[in-house]
Amino acid sequence: MRPTLILTLLLPLFTVIGCDKKDSGLLPSDPKKPVVGVAFDTLQTEYWVASRDAIKDELTAKNADMLLAVANNDANEQLKQINNFIAKKVDGIIVAPKDAQTVIPMIKAANRANIPIVLYNRPPAENSGKSVTVVADNLVITKATVSFMVEQAKKTGRKHKAMILVGDLGDVNAIGRRDGFDQVVGQVPDVIEVVARIPTEWNQEKAMSGVTNSLQAHPDIDLIFTSSDFLLPSIVSALKGAGKYKKVGEEGHVLLGGFDGDATAYQMLADGYLDADGVQDVYFECKEAVRAVFELRAGKDVPALIRDPGFVIHQGNRAELKAKMWGANIQKK
Amino acid sequence: MTPTLRTSPDNAAPHQSAVLSRTRTSTRLVPIARVALSEYSILILAVLYFLSMWPFIPELGSRANLTNLFISMLPLLAVAIGQTVVLITGGIDLSVTAIIATASIVAARIVSDGNGLLAHHPAAITAAVFAALLVGGVIGLLNGGAITLLGMPPFIVTLSMMMCVSGGTLWYTHSTNIANLPDGFIAIAYGAPLGIPLPLVIVVLLAVLVHILLRFTLPGFWLYAVGQNARTSRISGVPVRGVIVLAYVISGVCAAVASILLTARLETGSPTQGDKMLLDIIGASVIGGASLIGGKGKVIWTVFGVTLFSLIANTLELLDLQHFTIMMIKGGVILIAAGLDVLRRRLNFGN
C-alpha cells in the first residue's frame, strides 16, 4: 500500500486518538477568568456592532473574557463556531442566531456539553432544548410607537392614509412589529386607514421601489411606519422624490415612525423629520444576556424568555432618553 | 481495461507524469524543495501546521475539537471531490452552492414532519435522499449539456445556473426554512453505528468510489485526457462530450451528498444552505493540487487540501481572530496554493 494512502486512511483516526490536555497554553490569558463565547450571525449593521460592544462591556464589568465569532450569515459556519466554543470549554455561550431553526442543533450541542446558552435577539423554534432568549418585545414596543403616532394624527382632526413597511415574514420580529401596528390602527378606523402595505423582505431596494410606487398610487398618504429603521433612507429618498419630505409641524408633513433606534433615526429625530421611534434597549438586552449566562452557570433558574420592554423616543422626550438610545451613542462616536 | 493510450508519454495519466517529472527534476532540486513540491506537500504541511499550532492552542488536539474539525469538514470534502472531477476536465462548477440549497429544500420538503409531502411515511427518508441526489444529477446534466452542446464556457454556464437555481429556490420557499425534520433523517449527520460517525462512512465511501473511477476505469482516464487536451482526446476517439457531462453530473451528485449532510446537521432545509461555501470548495481543491487549467487532480489530494484548509480555519477561529482576518488569511492561503501549482508546473516544464 502506498504511504499516501496509509496516511490518508489514518487521518480520521485523529478523531479517536485526540487527547484532552488540560488548558496550559497561551489562551486564555488567565485560566481563572470566565470565558464567554459570543457568536454573531453578522456584524454588518450598526445594531449588531452596538450589541457586540455592549456585551463586551458587560463581560468586562463581570471580569470575564469574550471570545467572538462571526458567521457571515452562514448557519453551518455558526454551528462550527459554537462547537469550537464547546471544544474550548467556555463557561457560557451567547448567540445571535441566523434564524429560529438552524440554532436548534447549536442549543442541543451546548446542552450536551452542559454549557449555558443564551440566544440574543431571536427566539428559537419550538422543541429545541434548554436555552434562554433575550428579545425585544416587538409587539409592545410597536404598539406604543404607533399609539403615539395615532395621538399625533388625532390632533390634526382629519383622517390619515397610512403606509406600513413590513419586514421578512419568516422573521418573528417582523411579524411582531406588523401585528403591533395592525392592532393599534385597527382600533381607530376613523383616524387611520391603511392604504399600502409594502413587503420589503428586509431589502432596501424593494422598500424603495415599493414606497415610490405607493406614493404615486396614493399621493395622499400622510402616515408611514417602517418595521425597521434601516429602511428609513429608502423612505426619505422616495418622499423627497415626491416632494413630501417636510419637518414635523410644517405644512404637508408626513407622520413618520420607525423601529430599532439606530443612528439614522436619531439624526432624523434631531433634525425634526421623524415623529417617533420604537427603541430596542440594546444595553438592557446585553446586560440581561450576560446576567442570564452567569445565573445559569451558577445553577439558578432563569425564565426561558426575557423580554426587553424597550421605549418610545419622540420629539417630546428626545433630550431625556437620548442616552439610552443606542443609535444616539453611535452618533457620538 | 487498460487503454493503449496510457503508454503514450504525452497522454500519460497525471500520476505517471508527476512521477516522471519528479524523477527528472530530482537531480536539480534540493531535497526540501523536492518534498515541498511533491504530491505529499499538502499533507506534510497540514501535519507541520498542526504540530506548530498545538502548543499555542491546547484545545487543538482535544478529542472534542478534532471530532468537530473532521466531522464539520465532511460536507466540504464531499462537494470538493465533485469539484475536483470537474477541474480535472479543465472546467469549473460554480453552481454547486445552488445545488446544495436546492437539494436541501427538496429533501426537507419531502421529509419534514411539519408539512412534508411524505411526512411520517416510512419511505420518506429514502425518498428525500434519492430526490436530493436526483436534483444534483439533473442540474449537473443541464450544466454539462449546455457546455458541450452549445459550446459555452463552463464559467458562464454554471454561474448562470447558480443564479437561476438559487433564485428559483428562494422563490419557491419565500426565503423561509423548512424545519421539523424527523429524527431518522437527522441521524444521517449525528448517527454513529459501531461508534463510527455515519457522515464519515458516507463521505469515505464517496471518496473511494470517485477514486476508483478516476484511477482504475476508462472513463476516469478519459476525464484526465480531456482536461489535458480535448482536441487530441477527440481525435484519439475519446467521447469528449459524454465525459464532460459525466464530470458535471458527478459534481452535482457530490454537492447533493454535501447538501444532505448539511441539512441533517442543521436539522433544517434552507434556501441559503451552503451559499457561502463556494470559495472554500474551489480553494480547498486547488490547495490539494487540482489544477484550474485542467488535467490534474486526485481525490486524495483533495482530501489533503480540505484537511489543511479546514485545519487553518479551525485554528484561526480558536485563536479568536476576527472574521475579516480569517477571510484575508484564507484568501492568502488559496493564492499561495495556486502559486505553488504554477511553480510546480514551470519546474516540470523546464525539463
Image: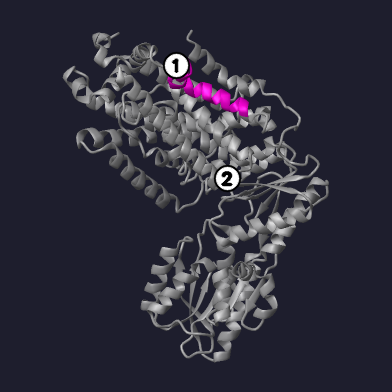
Considering only vertical position in the picture, is B3 above or below B210? above
User: Which element is circle 1 on?
Assistant: loop
B91 sits left or right of A179 in the view: left
Q: Which residues are magenta?
A: B30-52
B255 sits left or right of B326 in the view: left
Magenta span includes B89: no
Magenta span main SS: helix
Counting other residues with Cα less than 10 Å from the Cα at mark 1, is it few (<14), some (14-19), or many (20 or more)?
Answer: few
- Which chain hosts label 1? B
Residue A202 shows up from this direction? yes
Which image quarter holds the C terminus of chain A? bottom right
Marks 1/2 in contact by CB < 8 Å: the verdict is no
Q: Residue furthest left?
A: B235
- Residue A205, percent across and down? 41, 64
Counting other residues with Cα less than 10 Å from the Cα at mark 2, is it few (<14), some (14-19), or many (20 or more)?
Answer: many
* Badge 2 amino acid: Thr
Considering only vertical position in the picture, is A206 above or below B45? below
| Front residue of this view, candidates A91 and A174 | A91
B22 sits left or right of A107 in the view: left
- Residue B108, percent across and down? 49, 41
- Residue A78, percent across and down? 58, 43
Q: Quadrant of residue B214?
A: top left
The residues bearing labels 1 and 2 have C-alpha atoms spaced at a distance of 51 Å
Write the residue at 23% across / 32% down: B148
Q: Quadrant of residue B11?
A: top left
Q: Which residue is mark 2?
A: A102
Q: Which residue is mark 1?
A: B30
